[in-house]
Image (spheres, coloured by chain):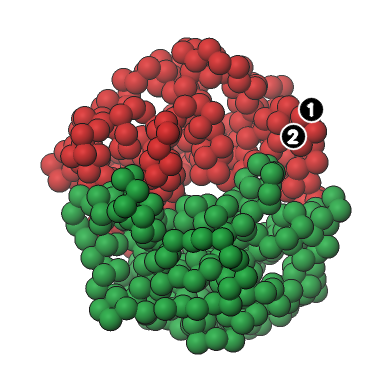
Chain colours: A red, B green
Amino acid sequence: MAQPSSKKHRNHPQYELLYHPGIPGRGEFIRLALEAAGVPYKDVARDEQDGYSTVQQICNNKGLESTDGNPPVFSPPALRIPGAGKDGKSALVIAQTPNILLYLGERLELVPEDDEAGRFYVQQLALTALDLNNEMHDSHHPIAGALYYEDQKPESLRKSQDVREMRIPKFLSYFERTLKHNEKTGNGQGLYLVGDKLTYADTTVWQVLDGCMFAFPKEMEARKQEFPALLGKFYENVKEESGLKEYLVSKRRLPYSMGVFRHYPELDRQ
Amino acid sequence: MAQPSSKKHRNHPQYELLYHPGIPGRGEFIRLALEAAGVPYKDVARDEQDGYSTVQQICNNKGLESTDGNPPVFSPPALRIPGAGKDGKSALVIAQTPNILLYLGERLELVPEDDEAGRFYVQQLALTALDLNNEMHDSHHPIAGALYYEDQKPESLRKSQDVREMRIPKFLSYFERTLKHNEKTGNGQGLYLVGDKLTYADTTVWQVLDGCMFAFPKEMEARKQEFPALLGKFYENVKEESGLKEYLVSKRRLPYSMGVFRHYPELDRQ
């Protein structure tokens, strides 16, 4: 079981992350939120014997329910929360990365307190970062997720050029300006995107930036001067946050490999 | 100003939709929610003189705020809510389609009452429908949104084949099973995806189905036998819902043209 450094003392259920075992992928957004909050969780595919068959049974079956009377799941990640079902005993299962973050955000105190607009801004930023996550996936899989990269390489070269030259700067500009907006209104000190403390917008945007740096190191290095607040102070600070600092050097943090973020040198800036 | 048939009598602010004027696009998910609730709104680009320059000023500027002290917007649609700003006087501006639906869902009574799990399921379904919406966009723009279809036609032919043969059936199966799950638990009568009355999951899934039928009429016709509950009773019923029935035959409902859903016969099933 994942045992992050615990800084929260309120009672939490035993959250169960249902995701693939070998890649950070979309599961990583959920892990970062839980780790930042210091709340223990079970990463089912990695922490349980035969855990991945449990994940597949719940997330990839063709039946009318996922498990415990919950409706079907389209694809992982999903979050299973024991005791949160309608009867107060069975488990609740929810899916879709931004939906899981929405559910956890308030419970893990990763949203601004007493600030409804701030909560919608956090979700807005997470959704936008997840859009860039999808575009990064498509940079090496523009035709079909079910085909190998090698079967869509000419298309990937074209797609990656657009992602690097047009899309990444548009996203980075948006995050940089949001960061500066928050600082300008007297909040965040350039460390946080919304309000005065870490939210799941910060962890989600950070993970996508980190993944982009892995996939396109030359491109991202070249962009540093354009977006110094985001790629400098903000990016570096998130790594130092309590919970995350310990997590990022632990074995629970999986290396990038053949998931959403892949390093094919030919797709990077030449 | 849009004047849908009003069935709700509680007080609503004058919601302002900020979106492109000539296509249903992602703005349509917001329009359908407001129309289903019978709540009047301003479709700024269409209802105001120079409205589209207001939309662009708010949604596409390169500054540190969108308007009224709100942080930047990545791209339309956005929703402007007069009087909902922090000071209770200025406007709140929020963006990202699923985030706007989340904001409106409760206010427009388009989520299950007293059912937190149901509310997360509604958002889960809307997010998943919006994922299919993105894949439909990519079926004719797999390389770059900034290029013409004609400049990415061979890639579109490959991409569309995957979308039609692999992705659409996966999404339709998920929605069909969710619909049947709801019915099996004694709710919805095959008319609603979550609970016993219309939610923004229904309107959002419906809009994507309708767009797919426009873009790929042969493909969707061929799929009807596989997914009879979704493409039959459910699809037909949403069109008859109060508010939507009047809207869909009104001039406020824009025809599909060169937006997310496009009909290129060569991309459809042959």
Q: Residues within 10 Å of mark 1 (few under 14, many from 20)?
A: few
Q: Is residue A27 left or right of residue A167?
A: right
Three-letter code for the amino acid on which mark 1 is drawn: Lys
Q: Position of residue A135 (x, y in %)?
A: 40, 54
Label disc, if present, on residue A85 of the rendered structure: 2
| Rendering coords of residue B159 (x, y %) | 51, 68
Is residue A157 at least partly visible in the picture? Answer: no
Secondary element under disc 2, as helix, strand or loop, is: loop
**Mark 2, chain letter?**
A
Q: Nearer the viewer, residue B252 or B201?
A: B252
Residue hosting label 1: A89
Q: Secondary structure at mark 1?
A: loop
Q: Residue at x 25, y 50 (%)?
A: B69
Q: Quadrant of the C terminus of chain B?
A: bottom right
Compared across the picture, whether A262 is left or right of B87 comes to right
Chain letter of the residue carrying label 1: A
Q: Is residue B28 above or below residue A240?
A: below
Does residue B13 lie above or below B248 as drawn?
above
Q: Nearer the viewer, residue A214 or B40?
A: B40
Left or right: residue A12 versus residue A227 is: right
Q: Quarter-wise, where is residue B35 in the image?
A: bottom right
Q: Residue B70: percent from the left, percent from the top?
A: 28, 50
* Residue at the spot 43% in from the left edge and 45% down from the top edge: A120
Q: Amino acid at mark 2?
A: Gly
* Residue A240: x %, y % from top left: 31, 20
Of the pair A11 and A177, the residue shown nearer to us: A11
